[in-house]
Image (cartoon, coloured by chain):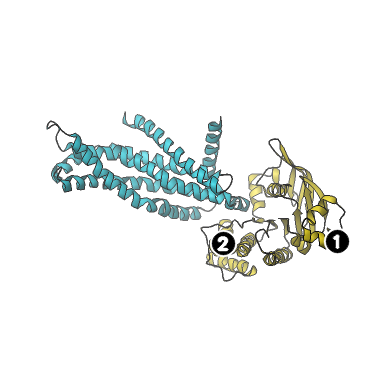
Chain colours: A cyan, B yellow
């Protein structure tokens, strides 16, 4: 029963946040600020993780090929498919659920416990629209971009790992990553990152918006937001994969 | 003028306010006093619409706020300025941006006009040197003054203060009290203050309402409060040993 109540409250809050803003210029300004904070602020961690994970995936792929019947270009092919289909959209989303999600929850939660949200409401400002909508728009714009960067760096990480360790020559790896490329897989990855971006921001904002108490509760809400977002990402990953790939 | 008619508030099985009636006059400092947990904050939240009363109505210049349409509520809310206990300043904004915020949201003024109004409001609370400071860089008294500057930015008809002196030393408390009194008279606002600071009661209490266990227990002005023979009020006012000794000198 409590889950249903929370889900209903979440839907109402998100619907409220999508109300028409009386000052679109202010919302645009906030979106740019949030893109910088949520997206650009996560760029470094996304780049580092993607590069090294790409390198590790390529090495593991090469380590599995024990028979000469499987051509070595499969390393490039397998690395590309793993990164595009699963690693960049899903694993990066899970990492961002921790980084961006806890940031959103703690920011909105602190505003709640210090009565800043009440101050907005008393002024006649739709606090959900002012605080949540720019974050959602910013994240659905920037997280797919981060996903593309992650794909590029992951594949590049595999290339560097293969060529520097002598596992594979550059030509074979490049042949593998261009082999049987399906553009739809990229579209699939972007659809997933778009949905996951919405999930991360909306759930985290919801957890922060309804914090009740003090700083300890803000911390608990941040943890809850990360857990809820991660589980939702995994669930939607399954649903979207079933719907889009089969 | 604000009128409260038969307001009561219940949270599941806990009744906090009982059949409360009061009138708050324009150009006057109306104080609501009472012990912690007596229902002062709930009453104020019902007044500004942060809580819906279980029964009764809150009338702003004759319009029932509790039954008003969303559009009407929004209009009334823009006539309300509120200063919260901790100031509730937006952490990510400077003092200047905090005061400019309601002007940017609710007027179509250009930057120069907004800057003029911000300057007027910050000068009015003697903070002309704090434009570029963030709330984290301000003292408690300065935060309250910035919050007052933000509250008066849109020239409100109604001003609400929740514990304006909490966390302040007595001298700074008196400065804030005098500022509230001056602003109330200067802008002819209907000012409602939640407090348990006895200095404020004596200093600025044009009208004082004492809440006891959710009921309106006493009503009068700040000067005749000490002569009251209401037992609960006297116990509340002269709670400390020092004040009891002062009482004996009357």
> Residue A140, image x and y in percent?
41, 45
Q: Nearer the viewer, residue B42 or A133?
A: B42
The chain to which mark 1 is attached is B
> Residue drawn at (56%, 44%), measured in percent from left and top?
A211
Per the image, the residue denoted by label 1 is B248
Would you say residue B237 is visible in this rendering? yes
Quadrant containing the N terminus of chain A is top right
Query: Badge 2: how crowded within 10 Å, few (<14), some, or many (20+)?
Result: many
Tell me the CA gap for discs 2 and 1. 50 Å
Q: Toward which corner of the image does residue B241 lie, by quadrant?
A: bottom right
> Residue drawn at (47%, 54%), measured in percent from left and top?
A30
- The disc, 2 or 1, on the residue closer to the chain's N-terminal end is 2
Q: Nearer the viewer, residue A217 or B186?
A: A217
Per the image, the residue denoted by label 2 is B100
Q: Toward which corner of the image does residue A241 lie, by quadrant?
A: top left
Query: Badge 1: how crowded within 10 Å, few (<14), some, or many (20+)?
Result: few
Q: From the viewer's perspective, is B128 left or right of B180?
A: left
> Residue A83, image x and y in percent?
28, 40
């Amino acid at each position: 029963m409590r889950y249903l109540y929370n889900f209903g409250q979440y839907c109402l809050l998100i619907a409220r946040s999508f109300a028409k803003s009386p000052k679109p210029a202010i919302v645009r300004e906030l979106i740019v600020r949030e893109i910088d904070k949520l997206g650009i602020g996560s760029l470094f961690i996304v780049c580092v993780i993607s590069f090294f994970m790409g390198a590790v995936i390529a090495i593991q792929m090469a380590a599995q090929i024990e028979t000469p019947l499987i051509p070595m270009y499969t390393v490039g092919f397998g690395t590309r498919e793993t990164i595009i289909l699963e690693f960049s959209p899903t694993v990066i989303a899970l990492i961002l659920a921790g980084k961006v999600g806890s940031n959103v929850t703690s920011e909105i939660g602190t505003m709640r416990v210090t009565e800043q949200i009440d101050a907005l409401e008393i002024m006649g400002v739709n606090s959900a629209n002012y605080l949540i909508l720019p974050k959602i728009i910013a994240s659905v714009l920037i997280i797919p971009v981060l996903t593309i960067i992650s794909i590029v760096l992951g594949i590049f990480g595999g290339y560097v790992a293969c060529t520097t360790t002598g596992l594979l020559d550059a030509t074979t790896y490049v042949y593998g990553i261009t082999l049987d490329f399906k553009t739809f897989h990229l579209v699939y990855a972007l659809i997933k990152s778009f949905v996951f971006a919405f999930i991360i921001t909306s759930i985290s904002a919801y957890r922060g918006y309804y914090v009740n108490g003090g700083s300890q509760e803000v911390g608990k809400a941040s943890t809850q937001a990360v857990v809820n977002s991660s589980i939702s990402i995994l669930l939607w990953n399954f649903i979207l994969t079933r719907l889009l790939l089969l | 003028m604000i009128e409260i008619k038969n307001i009561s508030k219940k949270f599941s099985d806990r009744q906090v306010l009982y059949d409360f009636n009061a009138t708050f006059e324009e150009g006057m400092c109306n104080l609501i006093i009472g012990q912690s947990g007596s229902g002062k904050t709930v009453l104020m939240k019902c007044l500004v619409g942060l809580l819906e009363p279980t029964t009764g109505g809150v009338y702003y210049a004759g319009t029932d706020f509790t039954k008003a349409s969303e559009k009407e509520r929004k209009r009334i809310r823009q006539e309300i300025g509120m200063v919260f206990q901790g100031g509730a300043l937006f952490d990510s904004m400077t003092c200047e941006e905090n005061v400019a915020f309601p002007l940017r949201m609710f007027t179509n003024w250009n930057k120069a006009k907004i800057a003029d109004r911000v300057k007027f409001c910050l000068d009015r609370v003697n903070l002309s040197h704090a434009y570029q400071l963030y709330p984290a860089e301000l003292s408690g008294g300065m935060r309250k003054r910035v919050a007052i500057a933000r509250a008066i930015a849109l020239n409100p008809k109604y001003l609400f203060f929740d514990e304006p002196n909490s966390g302040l030393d007595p001298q700074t408390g008196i400065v804030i009290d005098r500022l509230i009194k001056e602003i109330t008279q200067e802008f002819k606002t209907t000012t409602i203050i939640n407090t348990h600071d006895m200095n404020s009661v004596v200093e600025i209490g044009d009208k004082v309402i004492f809440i006891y266990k959710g009921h309106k227990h006493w009503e009068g002005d700040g000067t005749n409060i000490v002569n009251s023979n209401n037992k609960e009020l006297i116990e509340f006012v002269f709670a400390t040993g020092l004040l009891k000794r002062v009482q004996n000198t009357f």
